[in-house]
Image: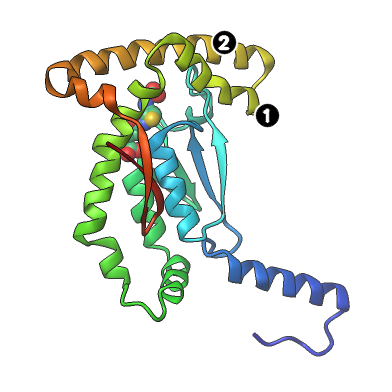
Amino acid sequence: MMLSSFRQPRSLVRTVKSSLRALSTAASEGDSIVQLYQYAICPFCNKTKAVLDYANVRYDTVEVNPLTKAEIKWSKDYRKVPIATYNDQVWKGSDVITEGILSLDDVQRNLTEKWQGTDMTMDDFRDNAKDEFWVSFTNDKLASLLYPNICANYADSYAAFGYVQHVKSFSWFQKQSIRAIGALAMYMAASKVKSTLKNKEEEETKRFRVVLFVDNHFGRFPLFI
Ligand SMILES: N[C@@H](CCC(=O)N[C@@H](CS)C(=O)NCC(=O)O)C(=O)O
């Protein structure tokens, strides 16, 4: 990087700071930041954040009110979380967001640097059997069975929705209503999932416990047995 020798001290400090920021974070062509619309306890959102963190991408989260979804009212055709925006792009769903992130030049550069001295490549990272296994495990097993496990009864479900108390953008009334109604809705949905699984995997679902964490390229994953 070239610095003008006549630069004022304050602007030099600013330049160094922003250079450091650029080195330590990958996301951003310009100063754009990925905006991630999420529920804090949504497994797909947390899976996406694991990718963002691994790739050292700067992002802001916007907590979506699960009762009104007012924060994503601009998205008419896709009403789930996570959704992410970056510059003029909208990425709908965790896998699309992951692909969007991995297609950014800065991210690719940063990851390639991170893997120096290993045999990992971008192509390998995006498409290999081990990752495919973990992505489908997360989507099909972990994500779909997490809610039935944390919302197994109303008390557990109410406890799981305790996260709303920490969302600064929600009013007192929103916190109480999301917690009470959300917990009931998730408890009912969880019961439905459980009865669907009853024939197939009843015992397996009941026995699910977090027993160990497995390291993967994306970070740490809980493994249920
Ligand atoms: N295939 C999607 C699934 C996303 C999903 O099902 N998200 C749930 C929250 S965990 C959702 O938004 N459900 C609709 C709702 O809350 O009304 C992905 O990978 O992102």
Q: Position of residue 147 (x, y in %)?
A: 37, 24
Label 1 sits on what residue type? Lys
Q: Nearer the viewer, residue 23 or 130?
A: 130
Q: Residues within 10 Å of mark 2 (few under 14, many from 20)?
A: some
| Residue 79 in view (yes/no) | no
Residue at 20%, 22% (x, y): give it. 203
Q: Is residue 142 above or below residue 70?
A: below
Dot 2: element: helix
Q: Is residue 72 above or below residue 34?
A: above
Residue at 45%, 44% (x, y): give it. 84
Residue 39's disc is none
Q: Position of residue 101 (x, y in %)?
A: 41, 57
* Residue 199 located left or right of residue 121: left
Q: Position of residue 162 (x, y in %)?
A: 57, 21
Mark 2 vs 1, N-terminal side? 1
Q: Nearer the viewer, residue 211 or 103?
A: 211
Q: Nearer the viewer, residue 47 or 28?
A: 47
Q: Residues within 10 Å of mark 1 (few under 14, many from 20)?
A: few
Label 1 CB sits under 8 Å from any ligand 1 atom = no
Outermost residue to the right = 9
Indicate which quadrant contains ligand 1. Answer: top left
Q: Is residue 178 above or below residue 144?
A: above
Outermost residue to the left = 199
Point out the image quarter for the N terminus. bottom right
Image label count: 2
Q: Position of residue 215 (x, y in %)?
A: 37, 55
Q: Quadrant of residue 5?
A: bottom right
Name the residue carrying label 1.
168
Name the residue carrying label 2.
177
Label 2 sits on what residue type? Ser
- Distance, label 2 to label 1, CA atoms, is 15 Å
Q: Nearer the viewer, residue 26 or 68?
A: 26
